[in-house]
Image: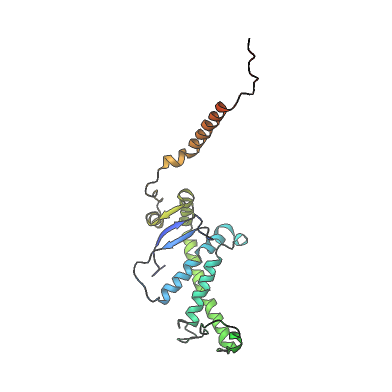
Amino acid sequence: MPSHDPVYKVSIIPRGRALGVTMFLPEEDRLSYSKQLLECQISTLFGGRIAEELIFGADMVTTGASNDIERATLLARNMVTKWGLSEKLGPLTYSEEDGEVFLGHSVTQHKAISDETSHTIDEEIRSIVDKNYARSEKILKENEAILHTMAEALIKYETIDSDQIDDLMEGKTPRPPSGWDDSDDDGSTSAKKKSKTKAKSSKEDDAPSSEPPAKPA
């Protein structure tokens, strides 16, 4: 995605309500956002949803991307109604002002836009979302091999950083994370088995014997 902040970490370790997270690191301070950057963010937000459908099929798509869809829709709506980034509607504000919430507030509000304009707003929001959804889908289909390789790396390492991501984008097998020891990973199961066997033997040694005590001669 041009103009988008680079990815510096991807993790499948659950955090709060999220089952995984993709983290971006801004390269510079930013006080305003270009239309190109906003559309790139919308495309990125749909990546997880599209990957689900691409790999598992439309019937197996889950609710996991609900927050991403909400954020993408809000960005598109703000582009149209607040930031003047719609070609059809131009540089005008169409959203109602945010004010204090109090009893009767909704009664005193008046309708600021016509039904026709409201319909055009919905069409423009749909157009922005559809365009960037299609772009994200195209990129994922063209790079499906990288998608599978990244999934395998995440299953093995759980978290990958910018070094592994660079390897993936270049079509390479990602290098292990810093401090990773494959021998620990391979031997973890046998080590656990040995530990359990040893603990079991210790308990058996300490347990009282089920045989009756010998009678004195």
Closer-to-camera residue (203/24): 203
Closer-to-camera residue (100/143): 100
Closer-to-camera residue (213/20): 213
Identify the residue at image location x=44%, y=73%: 38
Identify the residue at image location x=48%, y=69%: 43
**Within the image, what quadrant is residue 83 found in?**
bottom left
Q: Is residue 173 left or right of residue 13?
A: left
Q: Position of residue 212 (x, y in %)?
A: 65, 20
Q: Position of residue 97 (x, y in %)?
A: 51, 84
**Within the image, what quadrant is residue 119 found in?**
bottom right
Q: Residue furthest top?
A: 217
Is residue 114 depicted above or below 173 in this figure?
below
Is residue 18 depicted above or below 178 in this figure?
below
Q: Position of residue 138 (x, y in %)?
A: 49, 65
Q: Position of residue 13 (x, y in %)?
A: 49, 54
Where the N terminus falls, by quadrant?
A: bottom left
* Image coloring type: rainbow
Identify the residue at image location x=44%, y=70%: 40
Identify the residue at image location x=60%, y=62%: 58
Q: Residue furthest front?
A: 216
What is the total number of numbered labels drawn onto the structure image?
0
Is residue 204 depicted above or below 54 in this figure?
above
Where the C terminus falls, by quadrant?
A: top right
